[in-house]
Image (cartoon, rainbow, N blue to C red):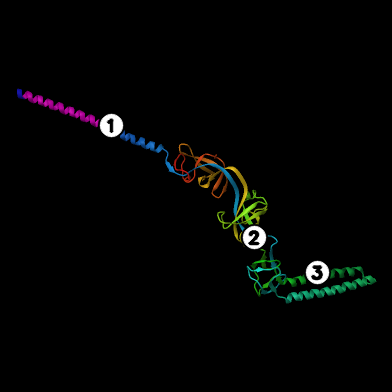
Amino acid sequence: MNRSAAFIVRTATLCAFAASFACSGAKGDAKDGAKAVDKDDAKPAAKAEEKKAPAAVAASIDTVRLGSFDETVDGVGSVVPRTGHIAVLAAPAQTRVVKIFVSAGDHVKADASLIDLEQPSFEAALSSAEATLRVAEQSAARATRLVAAGVAPRKDLEVATAELEAAKAGALNARRARDMSHVRAPFAGVVTRLSAVSGANVDVGQPLIEITDPSVLDLLLPVSPASASLIRPGQSVDLFEGNSAENAAIGRATVADVSAAVDSASRGVPVRLAITSTKRMLRVGESIFVRLVVNKHRNAVVINDDALVPTGEGFHVFVVDSAGVAHSRDVKLGGRAEHKLWISEGLKAGELIVTKGAFGMDEGAHVVGGKP
């Protein structure tokens, strides 16, 4: 009985200990499970917080300032001869080219020989015209005597006088054609075009040679109708090499005339510029970059061109607030000049804007950067 009682006591004690251990393990597992659940629930919340936070973007920031802005009209013009300083010489009659004394590009003096045309036809025409003139003079003199004597009617004298005047005109034209068969330079200049070929037949009025005075040249500048409305005769113009104002300046000009019509070929308005001074000799047909200041604006809002972002309907910039967050703002562009922009509406002095890095930036981005 004593052994059985002792065995029962030991068995009860072991069962109690096992139950106690099992309870403590369950509580630990419950705590660990709760912690795991809390961690899993915290991860989506953290991700949501990360999504809500604005992205940091590296960019340059600059302060909007007031400054002077020159509104300009830029373009590329062509050097052309000035009206009255170019001559196109043609054949006075159907004939043949006998001799050519010059080549294209040659400098010639006034009255210099350029081309000789075949002479026999001109000499024969002049001889015939002079003979006709002599006969007409004799007929007019005879009619005058007969009318004075009362033998012939007054009408015969009138007919003889008309024939005499026609003969004089014929002789004058024949003499002029003979003189023009020796083609000479009307003024000192350069041979800019030579179409005559030695030995070739030419028709009356066919152009043979072109002479241009290189000391008096103009620039022909095509501009848009909107730009033409800003240009006035007498305005000063700067001339530059090549196709940019960043190249060397080579001279100045003034606006001579603004056409009232649009050119059908270029769809631009031709503006003629009178060249007043150059650092080198310009050549006909040369392309020159032109910059014309049409308006000067003082205390204008001026920014760099890399801050402007084009949109479908206009332009906008990113304005940075005190917290460093960029906000898109629509602006109105007043004009361009090289790398500077005049903003007529939408910005004011003292505001911070994004310059380099504005393209591709999102609304609300956190800007990390400094002065450009």
Q: Quadrant of residue 66?
A: top right
Amino acid tagged 2? Val
For the residues marked 3 and 1, what is the alpha-carbon distance in whole angstroms? 125 Å
Q: Residue furthest front?
A: 279
For the residues marked 2 and 1, what is the alpha-carbon distance in whole angstroms? 91 Å
Amino acid tagged 1? Ala
Please name the residue that numbered disc 1 is placed on: 34
**Residue 80 numbered mark, or none:** 2
Residue count near mark 1 (Cα–Cα under 10 Å), binned few <14, some 14–19, many ≥20: few
Residue count near mark 2 (Cα–Cα under 10 Å), binned few <14, some 14–19, many ≥20: many
Where in the figure is residue 138, as x and y percent of width and height?
87, 74
Q: Is residue 256 left or right of residue 3?
A: right
Q: Is residue 267 visible?
A: no
Q: Secondary structure at mark 2?
A: strand
Where in the figure is residue 332, as x and y percent of width and height?
56, 42
User: Contact (CB < 8 A) between labels 2 and 1?
Assistant: no
Where in the figure is residue 116, as x and y percent of width and height?
69, 73
Residue positioned 58% across, 45% down in the render: 68
Q: Secondary structure at mark 3?
A: helix
Please name the residue that numbered disc 3 is placed on: 169
**Residue 347 numbered mark, or none:** none
Q: Which one is in front, 70 or 120?
A: 70
Q: Is residue 121 visible?
A: yes
Label whose residue precedes the other's in the sequence (3 or 1): 1
Amino acid tagged 3? Ala
Residue positioned 82% across, 74% down in the render: 132
Q: Residue furthest right?
A: 150
For the residues marked 3 and 2, what is the alpha-carbon distance in whole angstroms? 37 Å
Magenta-tinted stretch: 4-31
Count of labels shown?
Answer: 3
